[in-house]
């Protein structure tokens, strides 16, 4: 047996959560051991070869503003950029990049290997070593023991992973990669409650076997916007994707073979993602639909495979062939890797503090899919928060918890630890009640000061953020002070089908003119001498147009802050509150909310419960009603 005490942090797993956790711990000056089942697959994109998307793009940019790496890796390996939801309001605009899968993991491994303070070992963690409710380290399959001040578990889908293709199943966390089969018993042994979830992926096909001739081409944005603030300009030529559809014949093949599906035969016990269902689930659930979209996405610039986004399946190999050959452009498609489902163990996240530390064992953290989430972006967001808090605990500093009104990361983690999860959690803009304040254009304003505080953001980058904020404020104030006469403004207003300013009533400020729906910052440049770059102009326009809504949101947040001030001691005795329902008492004991704000979001907790809790807290602290 080999024992080592030379590490301060042990990170178990080197996926998107593990990468961020290891990097942030190392960059904050701690010695880190990164344990992985495969050094060659650090940062592997297990599912679709893309980063970002609806709400997920917000998470990427937030991790980036804190000093994380996922946005940088995305930009280094991007083959296409698209801003989603452009037709809707700016609160829900979401960036997405299509990426080179091989390059992504190559770059991920390189940044880990070249970061001081990180050691990598290809070993399976089999046991969490604890003593008196404190983590001590990790024991591996080689019977090595690595002691540390903190352990962060980021095993993804590998914890007791079971793969399904048709009615056949075999152990694995990804296709052709072994599962972590022994750690589950260790986690259960220290009292952790585990559940079972399922996810899946689509088949890959040879590029030479696909006929793209008659398929709709999907180009990237003409002016691509990078995901990281550290990427100043996109210079690589973008590669198109293609769109095809399933049809009635496809659906007939699927329905005729449902008895051979592990989902419908009872082979799969874990609960799958509601918002990213398999093609067999989509066909069965939406029987009125004649077709479903299939996106043909290149696996890389020089890759010989396409990923078929929208065709996630665990049907038998021969059925997958039949499905593909029924779809336009895929009539002769040759499968290089079949689609599959994977079941895996996860930790019910209600057992975690908002710092992602386990409530019952100090300095043991969990991040990523092991907490019941889906997606690279959700994993990366948890990884950086777990790494930050592990480092802060070692310095006896206050924990770092983002509020729901500060970041999508705050929404994600609060939902996990407050509401728990019974199915794979995916971030959506609709889950953020303050999404108008959590836009992608103001991420740096919201979060970069934290990255600076923790030494993860360079001072020069922070100064750029400050300068941009000051420039925006100057332009908005200039617009308030600049009044345009009807003679100057009306020609452009009329051209834009906006009501003209009546003659004889004086002018109107540029600020008020920009509030009009059809007027944009480009029009302001035309009708005034206010100079606006595209970057500043877009941000100014958003803040001017949504000024009233933003103020209303800020007023609501001020009320929430009053509830946040009412903190609840960790060992608070809920049994002593007369009048609480048994359900409320049970849930409060289970979640152990940190303040009244979090308590108010627990399912089953009523306003009257919160009032009782508030009165009891006041009484306990000796305050008058």
Image: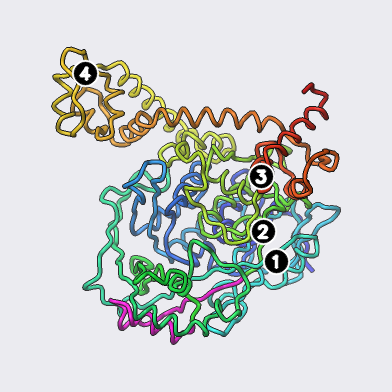
Q: Is residue 524 above or below residue 71?
A: above
The residue positioned 49% from the left and 80% from the top of the image is 315
- The percent coordinates of residue 241 (x first, y second) are 31, 64
- In front: mark 4 or mark 2? 4
- N-terminal of the pair, mark 3 or mark 2, is 2
Dot 2: within a 10 Å radius of its alpha carbon, few (fewer than 14), some, or many (20 or more) residues?
many
Q: Are marks 1 and 2 in contact (CB under 8 Å)?
A: yes
Left or right for 390, reference 209: right
Disc on the earlier residue, 3 or 1 = 1
Measured in 3D between alpha carbons, the distance from the residue under mark 1 to the one under mark 4, in whole angstroms, is 69 Å
| C-alpha span from label 4 to label 2 | 60 Å
Residue at disc 4, secondary structure:
strand
Given the current orientation, which residue lies at the most extreme bottom position? 318
Q: Residue at x 33, y 57 (%)?
A: 80
Residue 484: give its label.
4
Whole-angstrom CA distance, mark 3 to mark 2, is: 14 Å
Could you classify mark 3 by the number of other residues whose Cα lies within 10 Å: few (under 14), some (14-19), or many (20 or more)?
many
Q: Is residue 125 left or right of residue 207?
A: right
In the picture, the quarter occupied by the N terminus is bottom right
Mark 3 secondary-structure assignment: helix
Q: Position of residue 590 (x, y in %)?
A: 75, 50
Tags 3 and 1 touching, CB below 8 Å:
no
User: Magenta stretch?
Assistant: 316-343
- Indicate the secondary structure of the residue bearing disc 2: strand
Tell me which numbered mark, 1 or 4, is placed earlier along the sequence.
1
Q: CA distance from mark 3 to mark 1?
A: 22 Å
**Residue that label 1 marks:** 125
Label 1 or label 2, whichever lies nearer to me, is: 2
Whichever of labels 4 and 2 marks the residue nearer the N terminus, that label is 2
| Residue bearing mark 2 | 153
């Amino acid at each position: 047996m080999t024992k080592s005490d030379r590490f301060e942090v042990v990170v178990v797993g080197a996926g998107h959560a593990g990468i961020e956790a290891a990097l942030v711990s190392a960059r904050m000056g701690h010695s880190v051991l990164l344990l992985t089942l495969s050094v060659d697959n650090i940062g592997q994109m297990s599912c679709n070869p893309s980063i970002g998307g609806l709400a997920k793009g917000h998470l990427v940019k937030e991790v980036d503003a804190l000093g994380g790496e996922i946005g940088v890796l995305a930009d280094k390996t991007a083959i296409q950029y698209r801003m989603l939801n452009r037709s809707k309001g700016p609160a829900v605009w979401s960036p997405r990049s299509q990426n080179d899968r091989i390059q992504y993991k190559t770059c991920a491994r390189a940044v880990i290997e070249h970061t001081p303070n990180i050691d990598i070992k290809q070993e399976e963690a089999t046991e969490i070593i604890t003593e008196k409710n404190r983590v001590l380290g990790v024991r591996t399959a080689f019977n090595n023991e690595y002691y540390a001040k903190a352990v962060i578990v980021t095993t993804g889908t590998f914890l007791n992973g079971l793969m399904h293709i048709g009615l056949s199943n075999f152990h694995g966390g990804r296709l052709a990669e072994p599962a972590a089969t022994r750690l589950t018993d260790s986690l259960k042994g220290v009292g952790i409650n585990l559940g079972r979830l399922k996810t899946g992926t689509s088949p890959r096909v040879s590029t030479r076997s696909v006929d793209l001739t008659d398929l709709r081409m999907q180009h990237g944005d003409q002016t691509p916007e990078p995901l990281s603030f550290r990427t100043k300009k996109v210079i690589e030529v973008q590669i198109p994707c293609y769109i095809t559809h399933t049809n009635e014949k496809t659906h007939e093949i699927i329905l005729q073979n449902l008895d051979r599906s592990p989902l419908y035969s009872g082979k799969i016990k874990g609960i799958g993602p509601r918002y990213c269902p398999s093609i067999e689930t989509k066909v069965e659930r939406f029987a009125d639909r004649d077709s479903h979209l299939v996106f043909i996405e290149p696996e890389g610039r020089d890759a010989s495979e396409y990923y078929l986004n929208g065709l996630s399946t665990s049907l038998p190999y021969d059925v997958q062939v039949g499905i593909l050959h029924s779809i336009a452009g895929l009539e002769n498609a040759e499968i290089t890797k079949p689609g599959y489902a994977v079941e895996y163990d996860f930790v019910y996240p209600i057992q975690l503090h908002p710092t992602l530390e386990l409530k019952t064992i100090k300095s043991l953290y969990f991040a990523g899919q092991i907490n019941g989430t889906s997606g690279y972006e959700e994993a990366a967001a948890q990884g950086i928060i777990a790494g930050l808090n592990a480092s802060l605990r070692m310095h006896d500093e206050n924990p770092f918890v983002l509020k729901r009104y500060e970041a999508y990361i705050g929404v994600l983690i609060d939902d996990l630890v407050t509401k728990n999860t019974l199915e794979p959690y995916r971030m959506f803009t609709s889950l953020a009640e303050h999404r108008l304040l959590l836009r992608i254009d103001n991420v740096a304003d919201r979060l970069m000061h934290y990255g600076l505080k923790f030494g993860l953001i360079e001072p020069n980058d922070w100064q750029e953020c400050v300068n941009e904020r000051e420039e925006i404020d100057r332009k908005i104030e200039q617009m308030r002070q600049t009044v345009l006469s009807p003679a100057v403004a009306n020609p452009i207003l009329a051209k834009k089908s906006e009501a003209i300013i009546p003659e004889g009533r004086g002018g109107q400020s540029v600020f008020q003119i920009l509030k009009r729906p059809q007027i944009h910052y480009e029009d302001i440049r035309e009708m005034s001498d206010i100079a606006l770059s595209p970057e500043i102009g877009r941000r100014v326009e958003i803040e001017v147009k949504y000024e009233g809504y933003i103020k209303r949101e800020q007023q609501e947040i001020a009320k929430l802050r009053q509830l946040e001030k009412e903190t609840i001691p960790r060992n608070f005795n809920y049994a002593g509150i007369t009048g609480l329902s048994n359900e409320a008492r049970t849930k409060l004991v289970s979640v152990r909310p940190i303040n009244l704000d979090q308590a108010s979001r627990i399912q089953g907790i009523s306003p009257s419960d919160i009032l009782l809790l508030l009165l009891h807290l006041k009484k306990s602290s000796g305050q008058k009603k």
